[in-house]
Image (tube, rainbow, N blue to C red):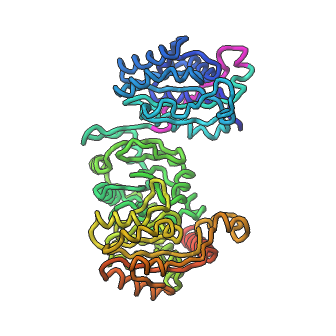
Amino acid sequence: MIESNAHRAHLIVAELVRCGVDEFIIAPGFRSAPLALAAISHPGTHCTVHFDERGSAFFALGYGRATRKPCVWITTSGTAAANGLPAIVEASMDSVPMICLTADRPPELRDTGANQTIDQVHLFGRYPRWFVDLPVPVSERDGAYIRSTIDQAVHRACDGPVHLNCMFREPLLEEDQEEKSIPKMSWSTEEREQTQYMTAVGSAFAPSQRLVRKICEAHRGLIIVGSLQSPEGGKAVHALAKHLGWPLMADISAPVPPVENMVTFFDLIVRSERFTRQYSPDVVLHFGGPLVSKKLQQFLSHARAETYALIAPSSDRIDPYHVLTDRIQSKISGFCNYLLGEVPRDKSHAAWTEAWMRANTLARRTLVSLLDHKLSEPSVAWMLSRLSDHTNWILGASSMPIRDLQAFLERDATPRVFANRGASGIDGTLATAAGIARGQSGTGTVLLGDLAMLHDLNSLALLKDRDITIVVVNNNGGGIFNMLPIALEQEPFETVLGTPHGMDFRFAAEQFQIPYTLADSCARFKETWRAAAASAGPNLIEVRTDRRENADLHETIYTSVNEAIEAELLT
């Protein structure tokens, strides 16, 4: 169903009120009329109307300075919005709470010479603590995104201004709204905001009793660990997982020590629709940042757990599917230590955890049968975990290497795994490895694809005298695109996505005086890798694969794991 401007505006105002923001200052304008009418019609708001945009913005500043609560400044588009800059600068420089809702034209009117249309994206520069360019209303299914955006905005506005630029397309008001000043629209009766925010103060931390109660009452709890920078945090999660007994699913780059209830092969398991429907969580504790595994993210979004709490020390919004019910800004160790003292051990989770661990065993058994014999991209990642007693760390390049490490690397005694997952680019992988080697003791392995290698060939010079084994998987192009549901074997897909180049890396290794080996079997790979890891300086091992065969093997693995789980756990 198409979302109306009125519905979008009501959703924004209702969520602000649910978050405890009830003071509004409105500067009149037609583009902002949906927001203004929604604010003045809500029974829980107090609205002041002032004809001057500059003065109204300073009103919001004064309210925030006096109460330490944000006032919402609503204004129309164009230079009307620009008049708020002085107040926003002052609020930013003195950390005064403030929320700016500026109305804007839809994208098709931008840069077209349309009347009263200026560039309002980051209109106030770097002064706001946070900026969002809200899209025009399209579907009512966007409600979770809008609500979680407002929740984040209120959280960020605690110590300075935030700016939400709200695009609206004409007709701005429905016919009944044009005839009457107050729209006929019922307000939501939901009691709480979509995502509740909590911030730890110093070392003391006490989450809401509601959250603690939900954790204590959980019947199907999951512990998820995303990207994690601190080994201290990983150890704290390890202790909490051992205490609660819930299944633990840790991102490949998260330094979490192995524990008996760790589900290593969750990326494969959650592809089973029947299993995930039957074993869906009611409480999720997510520590750290985003996840490498897209399939795990999708499973968690579809599960719609009654309580989904994300705990991380930053204030960043980490909610790509808009499912968080609780966002706790805290040191991970502080939160875990608090729960260890508040939540008793509960063995009622045994059957739930056992089902996940049984699925993990079945996945591992399937991998043994499929990957122990023939050299392939998955088998390289699989073998690295078994050879890890000779190395201290692994760097997985973006695209398929880090995904294969996530799916197929065993966690028992696995070395520290690094990855550039901030923006997930393939560039600079070798240079990153050189930097890690400078800051990390011991030997390392870099697993990367041929395109990532071509992007960073010159950085082979940085690896001189560093104990690094470079494993380059050469499938003559972008192998990840063969995983997509498009006909890559046909033009123009192969040319523009596959990007075949026809090169190998023997002469590149020779150019930089790095020992080179072409591995053509699992036995040859293991033998070469062990020798390289035991020797001083860099080594380069090339593994040549076929993109189509690689895609087929991945599909075979997914299907085989699914069949094994369904045959033994869902009969």
Tell me where residue 456 appears, x and y as whole percent.
46, 66
- Does 24 appear above or below 227? above
* The C terminus sits in image quarter: bottom right
In this view, the residue farthest toward the left is: 203
- Does 308 appear above or below 30? below
Q: Main secondary structure of the magenta part?
A: loop
Q: Is residue 413 visible?
A: yes
- Does 131 appear above or below 96? below
Tell me where residue 244 appears, x and y as whole percent.
35, 56
Q: Nearer the viewer, residue 360 or 225?
A: 225
Q: Nearer the viewer, residue 186 or 518?
A: 518
In this rendering, position of residue 490 left or right of residue 253: right
Q: Residue 189: say if magenta.
A: yes
- Does 23 appear above or below 440? above
Tell me where residue 139 appears, x and y as whole percent.
67, 39
Name the residue: 44% across, 17% down: 58
* The N terminus sits in image quarter: top right
Determine the image quadrant of residue 185.
top right
Determine the image quadrant of residue 555.
bottom right
Name the residue: 37% across, 25% down: 96
Tell me where residue 514 appears, x and y as whole percent.
39, 79
Q: Nearer the viewer, residue 460 or 283?
A: 460
Q: Residue 489: say if magenta.
A: no
In this rendering, position of residue 403 left or right of residue 232: right
Magenta highlight range: 176-195
Q: Is residue 566 visible?
A: no
Determine the image quadrant of residue 276.
bottom right
| Mark count | 0
In this view, the residue farthest toward the front is: 511
